Image: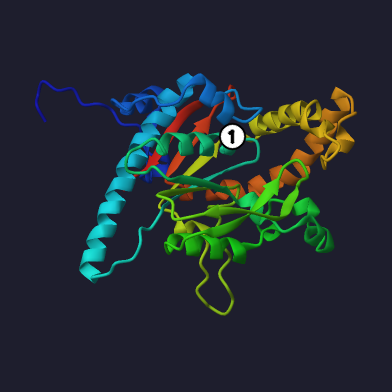
């Protein structure tokens, strides 16, 4: 060390165990934007964000532009590696999509994050074709959940058609064209019968869902069992404290009571005429009985498996970023 240089103290890792992540404050992460251009307008952002997500253009600039820059570099490197492997094998397979998983609790803002990433990444020259699929479409239909006694477990691992989801990801990753995914309606709270989303050899596929980072339980017979995140090249986990998430869920439920719940087709139409106090009680009950249990049992334990963790404060703004070390 140069004697004129002053050593910078390092924050010790918890328990003396080195963290697999590099941690950044909001300001530190924002500085990594470099010269990445802002390609979204306020009008774009208004269309992309969810009803209950007060995300600002400043958030896009300080958090999502650096992330899109990092992902563009990762995708380019992966594309180069794929071409090198093709040359080695003497193969002429089609391109393999780069798959990004977006995970986190109900009400944490996954949908907004996924849509913003899709918009930003599709504006990069080497990834013009970006698709987004949510795992909600792979939920079992309500009639099946009701028959199996799983309606109060909706969003839990057992409520999904995991074989169909794995088959979809396998086909996409194999470079197959026109792969179909089911579509889910948050209005009717059910899979839309006969409606499909077609994914045709994208440069990037974003897969958003609460449990996309969950590993399955080892089978008793020792057989190899693939799981969703096996197909991911990168993953993002959105984190916030439980008490904050509960308040966000209740706030969203209150807003939906005044908007989409009033649609005669809405599954939750029965809550549209409740008072504000009654709506809060119902929302709190649903959160604590279903969503909090799913968060604690299945979602939160997957956070350490993510490539990137975005931690939100009570004001919805991302306060810290943790990037997994390579």
Q: Return the x and y of residue 186 as percentages of the image width and height.
A: 72, 42
Q: Is residue 23 visible?
A: no
Question: Residue 123 appears in which quarter of the rendering?
Answer: top left
Q: Return the x and y of residue 187 as percentages of the image width and height.
A: 76, 40
- In the depicted structure, whether residue 48 falls above or below residue 211: above
Q: Is residue 38 visible?
A: yes
Which is nearer the eye, 164 or 54?
Answer: 164
Which residue is at 31% across, 31% downward?
10
Which residue is at 55% across, 54% downward?
198
Residue designated by label 1: 109
Which residue is at 49% across, 33% downward?
116
Count residues near mark 1 (Cα–Cα under 10 Å), then give few for <14, some for 14-19, many for 20+. many
Left/right of residue 165 with respect to residue 11 in the rendered view: right
Where disc 1 sits, the SS reads: loop
Which is nearer the eye, 316 or 263?
Answer: 263
Left/right of residue 253 with respect to residue 54 in the rendered view: right
């Amino acid at each position: 060390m140069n004697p004129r240089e002053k050593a910078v103290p390092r924050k010790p890792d918890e328990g003396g165990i080195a963290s697999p992540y590099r941690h950044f404050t909001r300001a530190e992460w924002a500085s990594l934007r470099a010269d990445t251009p802002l390609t979204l307008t306020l009008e774009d952002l208004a269309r992309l964000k969810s009803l209950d997500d007060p995300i600002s253009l400043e958030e896009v600039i300080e958090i999502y532009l650096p992330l899109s820059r990092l992902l563009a570099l990762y995708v380019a490197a992966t594309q180069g590696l794929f071409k090198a492997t093709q040359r080695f094998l003497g193969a002429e397979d089609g391109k393999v999509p780069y798959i990004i998983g977006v995970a986190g609790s109900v009400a944490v803002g996954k949908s907004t994050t996924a849509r913003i990433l899709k918009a930003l990444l599709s504006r990069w020259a080497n990834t013009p074709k970006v698709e987004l699929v949510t795992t909600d479409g792979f939920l079992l239909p309500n009639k099946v959940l009701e028959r199996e006694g799983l309606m109060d477990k909706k969003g839990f691992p057992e409520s999904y058609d995991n074989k169909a989801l794995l088959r979809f990801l396998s086909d996409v990753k194999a470079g197959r064209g026109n792969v179909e995914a089911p579509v889910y309606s948050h209005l009717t709270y059910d899979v839309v019968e006969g409606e499909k989303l077609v994914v045709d050899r994208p440069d990037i596929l974003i897969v958003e869902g609460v449990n996309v980072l969950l590993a399955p339980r080892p089978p008793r017979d020792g057989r190899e069992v693939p799981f969703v995140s096996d197909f991911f090249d990168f993953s993002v986990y959105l984190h916030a404290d439980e008490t904050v998430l509960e308040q966000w869920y209740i706030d969203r439920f209150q807003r939906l009571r005044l908007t989409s719940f009033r649609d005669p087709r809405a599954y939750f139409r029965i809550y549209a005429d409740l008072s504000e106090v009654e709506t809060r009680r119902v929302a709190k009950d649903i959160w604590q009985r279903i969503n909090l249990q799913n968060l604690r049992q299945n979602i939160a334990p997957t956070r350490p498996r993510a490539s990137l963790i975005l931690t939100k404060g009570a004001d919805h703004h991302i306060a810290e970023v943790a990037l997994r070390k390579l």
